[in-house]
Image: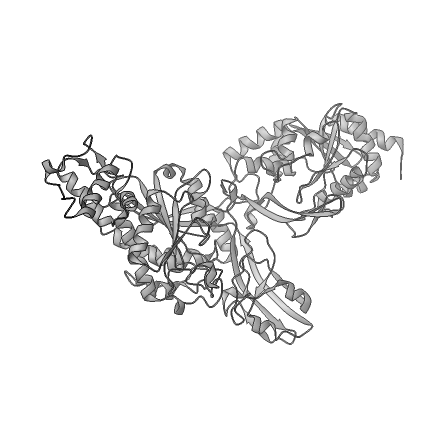
């Protein structure tokens, strides 16, 4: 170790000339290679810290990057032993490791961009961070609030993550938020975490480049510099740098990227060789044709296959397509990346291919990470999924948010895998894209809305939930021919869960006008219909649709919320939304032994052969009957006071000759008070809807009742 006083003195003086002083909060980057080239200073971390500490004093705070990119690299993160990145950041990480060994130093828990802090404000800057690298409450926002200085010893003062923080806060077009998941070890104990980090698009145009900002900062006198040997010490005030970046990004949003500027989606589509699947549909295609043309497409939640399927459906009805870019905040959710799988397979070492993505897209786990290597049988089996009940089926497995690589095959095939080693290839990539929601609207007299919904995702499967899509489409085609509708109807075709969240969070003004809804799924099966009630369970829509199901499908059954199926109806019924959405399916009660839902669920056996035309047609007709019934929902209001003098209006029914009819009439009369619908009155009376409706219509004709609509 070299403790030469002149070396230390040179650095102290350089730091002071560069603008650092007592009490400063300093974000420091150090280039190890630069220091090695300096004739005056050796790469001595103790000397370096001692010099900085003398300049900022006991009231100052030092923050040093220790970047590991652990979650980005799909690795565990250890707050004590995370590996350091390369380049200037790697050099600073070496200094950070030294600093972390000093008493009182604190390392942040960010698994991608951790820092080490030491000094008076260390706790304030890095303790209890939210799970975001550059979002609200992050280290860099705290550094800005503390009016800190960025200092570089042989390193850039602009090419730091602080710049990414400003970029994210200004929503530059070439960066997007991404959720990373993994394990963080603290005191040797692992715990699952998720962390949000904004990243640039992978097209070369989006590569980070702070050189233009650095030149402007220097030419505007914002950067103070001092020479130390053959190296340079420089500093810039965070507030001043932030103001400069904000002004320049307002002029040119691509100023901090390599460029040239472009449409990020188009740039990424070019890079990933985006594919459009040719789908030729007949005009007014049948449900059977729609299924046959669309079911095999790789319809992952954000993918070329999904987009092609939605575009094909848009040729059948007038459709608005809403797009939500990757990284968009949707309440607590973040829109994920687009996923493209170019190819994937498992081979023996002598080149015998056992199965491939080309055979069936279910062979590769949806959103699998790429892999191309030889693996042991033991490791392969850790990533090879089979169906729990169907030995000859390929399961549908997805890892949208907890990323890993994976393959799927039948249990029968897996039993034949006896070699010690295999070759695995999955050529996939994630990229910036847009989540798409198709919306078909049929206006009615009222702006109050009934929402139908079905999800289009799930590759190479039919009942879950392409069946719901085609039934909903045919319902809307029927409604488009009508001009007498009371309510407005919207049919949403979307990716499961995240599609509903994206739509609702960006269409909040529509929520108060949503009277209720119906999710459609698994409707090609031969089972009786199952109606799952809304979260409230006792709305007029719940009562009306329940009555229609009992009348139209006596073998059908009804269950409370979250006891029949689980799908996007959850998002509509959720807190802060509370739209009473029911769901209609053809699943059996759990006691039937086919749980979950039906035997072929989430497997390669969910094919068109198991989506029966008569079932689809019956479900379409049932939905239309439900709509007709709700269109006729009335809440009659009495225009009379006291008991009606029935003889005056010719309503008298002899109690001796027809006691049941007499009692029914007066039961109805006593329940009409402007608070109960016709269906509710019928339920209370134990009478049919039609008989009660006819009595009320007669009373309306006599001017005794206002048959107003709900």
Residue at the image position 67 percent from the left and 67 percent from the top = 374
The image position of residue 3, as x and y in percent, is 89, 35
Using residue 149 as the reference point, say whether residue 552 is left or right of it: left
Query: Considering only vertical position in the picture, is 575 above or below 204?
Result: above
The image position of residue 450, as x and y in percent, is 33, 45
| Of residues 460 and 214, the one drawn nearer to the viewer in this rendering | 460
List the single residue furthest toward the front: 656
The image position of residue 656, as x and y in percent, is 15, 46
Query: Considering only vertical position in the picture, is 563 above or below 110?
Result: below
Residue at the image position 77 percent from the left and 35 percent from the top = 105
| Of residues 674 and 619, the one drawn nearer to the viewer in this rendering | 674
Q: How is the image coloured?
A: one colour
Can the viewer see residue 220 in this picture? no
Using residue 303 as the reference point, say whether residue 103 is left or right of it: right
Q: Quadrant of residue 701?
A: top left
Query: How many marks can you see?
Result: 0
The image position of residue 133, as x and y in percent, is 62, 40
| Of residues 351 and 521, the one drawn nearer to the viewer in this rendering | 521
Can the viewer see residue 485 in this picture? yes
Using residue 480 as the reference point, say whether residue 513 is left or right of it: right
Q: Quarter holding the C terminus?
A: top left
| Of residues 478 and 94, the one drawn nearer to the viewer in this rendering | 478
Q: Quarter holding the N terminus?
A: top right
């Amino acid at each position: 170790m070299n403790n030469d006083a002149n070396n230390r003195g040179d650095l102290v003086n350089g730091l002071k000339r560069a603008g650092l002083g007592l009490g400063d909060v300093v974000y420091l980057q150090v280039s190890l290679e630069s220091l090695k080239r300096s004739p005056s200073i050796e790469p001595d971390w103790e000397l370096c810290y001692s010099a900085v500490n003398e300049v900022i004093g006991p009231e100052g705070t030092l923050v040093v990057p220790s970047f590991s990119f652990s979650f980005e690299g799909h690795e565990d993160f250890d707050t004590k032993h995370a590996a350091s990145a390369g380049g200037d950041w790697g050099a600073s990480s070496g200094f950070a490791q030294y600093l972390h060994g000093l008493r009182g130093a604190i390392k942040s828990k960010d698994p991608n961009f951790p820092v080490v802090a030491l000094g008076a404000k260390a706790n304030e800057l890095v303790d209890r961070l939210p799970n975001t690298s550059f979002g609200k409450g992050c280290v860099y926002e705290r550094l800005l609030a503390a009016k800190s200085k960025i200092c570089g010893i042989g390193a850039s003062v602009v090419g730091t993550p602080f710049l990414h923080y400003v970029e994210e806060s200004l929503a530059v077009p070439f960066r997007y938020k991404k959720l990373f998941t993994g394990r963080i070890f603290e005191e040797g104990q692992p715990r699952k975490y998720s962390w949000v980090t904004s990243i640039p698009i992978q097209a070369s145009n989006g590569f980070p480049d702070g050189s233009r900002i650095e030149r402007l900062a220097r030419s505007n006198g914002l950067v103070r510099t001092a020479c130390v040997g053959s190296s340079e010490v420089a500093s810039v005030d965070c507030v001043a740098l932030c103001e400069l970046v904000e002004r320049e990004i307002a002029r040119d949003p691509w100023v901090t990227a390599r460029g040239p500027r472009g449409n990020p989606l188009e740039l990424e589509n070019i890079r990933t060789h985006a594919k459009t699947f040719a789908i030729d549909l007949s005009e007014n295609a049948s449900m059977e044709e729609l299924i046959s043309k669309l079911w095999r497409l790789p319809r992952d939640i954000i993918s070329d296959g999904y987009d092609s399927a939605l575009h094909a459906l848009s040729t059948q009805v007038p459709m608005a397509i809403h797009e939500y870019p990757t990284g968009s905040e949707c309440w607590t959710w973040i829109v994920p990346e687009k996923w493209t799988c170019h190819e994937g397979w498992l081979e023996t070492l002598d080149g015998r291919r056992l199965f491939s993505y080309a055979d069936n897209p279910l062979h590769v786990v949806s959103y699998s990470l790429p892999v191309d290597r030889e693996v042991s049988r033991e490791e392969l089996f850790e990533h090879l999924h089979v169906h729990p009940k169907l030995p000859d089926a390929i399961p549908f497995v997805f890892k949208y948010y907890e990323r890993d690589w994976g393959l799927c095959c039948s249990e029968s095939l897996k039993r034949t895998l006896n070699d010690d080693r295999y070759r695995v290839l999955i050529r996939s990539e994630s990229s910036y894209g847009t989540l798409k929601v198709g919306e078909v609207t049929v206006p009615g007299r009222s702006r109050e809305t009934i929402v139908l919904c079905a999800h289009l995702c799930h590759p190479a499967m039919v009942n879950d939930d392409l069946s719901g899509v085609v039934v909903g489409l045919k319902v809307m085609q029927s409604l488009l021919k009508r001009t007498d509708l009371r309510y407005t109807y919207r049919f949403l075709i979307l990716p499961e869960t995240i599609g509903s969240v994206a739509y609702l969070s960006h269409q909040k003004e529509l929520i108060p006008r949503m009277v209720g809804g119906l999710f459609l799924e698994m409707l090609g099966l031969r089972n009786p219909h199952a109606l799952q009630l809304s979260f409230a369970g006792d709305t007029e829509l719940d009562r009306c649709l329940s009555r229609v199901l009992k009348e139209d499908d006596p073998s059908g059954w009804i269950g409370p919320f979250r006891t029949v199926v689980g799908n996007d109806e959850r998002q509509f019924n959720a807190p802060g939304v509370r739209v009473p959405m029911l769901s209609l399916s053809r699943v059996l009660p759990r006691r039937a032994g086919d749980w979950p839902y039906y035997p072929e669920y989430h497997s390669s056996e969910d094919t068109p052969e198991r989506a029966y035309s008569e079932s689809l047609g019956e479900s379409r007709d049932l939905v239309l009957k439900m709509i007709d019934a709700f269109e006729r929902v009335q809440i009659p209001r009495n225009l009379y006071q006291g008991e009606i003098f029935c003889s005056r209006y010719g309503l008298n029914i002899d109690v001796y000759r027809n006691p049941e009819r007499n009692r029914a009439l007066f039961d109805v009369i006593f329940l009409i008070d402007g608070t109960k619908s016709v269906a509710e009155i019928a339920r209370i009376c134990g009478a049919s809807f039609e008989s009660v409706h006819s009595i009320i219509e007669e009373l309306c004709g006599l001017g005794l009742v206002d048959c107003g609509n709900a």
